[in-house]
Image (spheres, rainbow, N blue to C red):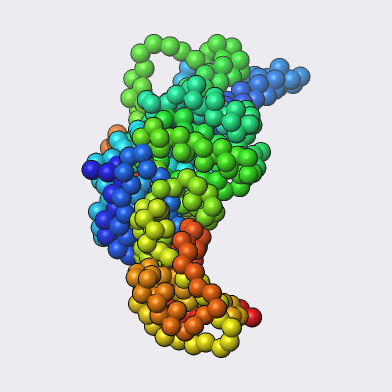
Amino acid sequence: MWYMPYMRVRSAVQVYAYFAVGISLVAIALRYWPGALHLEGQDQRLHSFHVDVLALIAGSAALVGGLATVLGLNLASENDGHLEIAWTKPVSREGYALGVFAVDIAAMVVCLFITVVCVAIVLDVYTGSQAVTFGPNPELLRVLAFCGAPLCVYGWIAALSASIKHNRGAVAGLFWPLMFVVALLHVVPIPVVHNVAAVLNLFNPIEIYSSSDSGPQPSPWSYAWGWALAVIMLTAAVLQWRRLQL
Amino acid sequence: MNPIAIESLSKRYGTFEAVRDVSFEVPAGSICGLLGPNGSGKSTTFKCMMGLARADAGNISIDGGPPRPAMFEHLAFVPERSALYDRFSGATHLEMTRRAFASYDAGRAKAMLEIFSLDPNKRVSKLSKGQRTALGLVLAFAIRPRIMVLDEPASGLDPIHQRAVLDLLIEAAAAGTAIVLSSHQIGQVERAADRVVVLKRGRVVLDGDLDELRGREKLVEAVFAGPFDDRPFAMDPRIRRVERRGPTLRLYVHADPDGVMRDVGALAPVSLNLLDQNLEELFFSAVEEPRPATLEVR
């Protein structure tokens, strides 16, 4: 029933995997380049690694975020000339949309796994087996909660684009700049702007999932809200999808 | 109940009334031709039948109930415009159909590919318009549907494959499939269909069994030696359309042809004939502007 969404996602995952593996190979090659910096773990904790390594991790996260942005447009791409096929199968519109979501989310899980493996290998190469550890981790719940970030982005994009027939790329293109601007408005020292931005940022994935060494870490409630927002947005996408007509 | 039953269907897009009070039925084993000029409401009717658009009023019954997902297990819809995925091949589309429909018949699909000389490994983006139409038909026939709804099914096909489509439709109808198709090629519809519904500006202007229509709708053709007055016929309720070509008067009659013959005979023409109408004449008499649309061609 969801073979076409699967085929579409398969291509996206393939491209993602090529990028992830390619970046990792480049990183590994740089490690052995004459004069390359050899990073040492300071206290066996991931956040203590050199900023370059963190940049690599951030790059990987951006890839996942990018994938969520691309996959979030899948209902819109069905709406761009394929509804006569998508809606004439023995499955309800809601069922079809939920199936598309399931396929897309599975793809994001696969890509997260690819990212983790690639980052682990690169860290291992850079630090001489000091970085990657296995076993019980008290931060596991926080890490899993953070995995809601791409889902939140995916839900937002799906909700914004589900009823769009053409120009769905504009949604993806404008989403991130808009979210960054709203996030930056939060620090504008004008009370009205600050307050409006504070409300808007309740729905901003960047603010929900952002943290810094100097500021407070997001609370478990913030992560839970991120997951809830994803569910709300996906529901909004389904509601739009079922109301569409040719 | 007939597999397809449409009753008083109406649909508006904003202020535009796409279809109004459209009713027709298609029994099992029957082919119904839905005819009409561009913008007459054929595609809108199909969209409402398939649940792709919401009807504003009326009842639609497909396979014994309102449009619903389960009906598509035994229903094939071929839209006017190709909805295929450009970046995927015919084989991928067939695999999609195989996975979605329990009734998919791989042997049938293979035979259909051969009939239409299609390479399943070609991407849709590399296919011509006719080949895309053909692929849509392959997907439709591959599930051996009980109901087929085809919007311009032969569009872009060469004459050989157009004929193949008609043969396939006739064969499917003989096996009990209820088929409704639209086409601008009246000759094709006349060859395949046993019923026709003609739409004009969203309304049904002609509907019925093709043989009955041919028997009911007559053409009175008279040739005059000198001047004659055709104005009385322009307002005659028995006459759909009046056409005047030089000395020849043609009256498309839908009631009381014998009475019309008597009235024309009273004008003393040099020749007077009562003819059956073919589908093309039926179509034009139904959709061209009525009186006072006396057409004079000199």
Residue A2 image point, x, y percent: 42, 31
Q: Which residue is painted at 42% across and 74% down in the image?
A: B261
Q: Is residue B120 left or right of residue A102?
A: right
Quarter the N terminus of chain A occupies:
top left
The residue at the point 48 percent across, 22 percent down is B106
- Residue B104 visible within the image: yes
Compare residues B214 and A94 and report the one nearer the observer: B214
Q: Is residue A40 above or below residue A191?
A: above
In the depicted view, which residue is nearer to us: A244 or B279?
B279
Q: Is residue B224 above or below residue B137?
A: below
Q: Is residue B255 left or right of residue A81?
A: left
Total marks shown come to 0
Picture quadrant of residue B239: bottom left
Q: Position of residue B88 (x, y in %)?
A: 57, 34
Position of residue B296 in the picture relative to residue B194 (left or right): right
Residue at image point 41% right, 70% down: B253
Name the one closer to the observer, B229 or B105: B229
Tell me what residue is drawn at x 57 percent, y 48 percent: B155
**As drawn, which residue projects farthest toward the right?**
A34
- Quadrant location of residue A121? top right
Image coordinates of residue B93 in percent, x first then y, are: 52, 32
Task: Relative to B186, say whether A21 is above or below.
Answer: above
Measured from the top left, where is residue A117 in percent x and y? 52, 18
Q: Is residue A215 visible?
A: no
Query: Which residue is nearer to you in this view: A156 or B24?
Result: B24
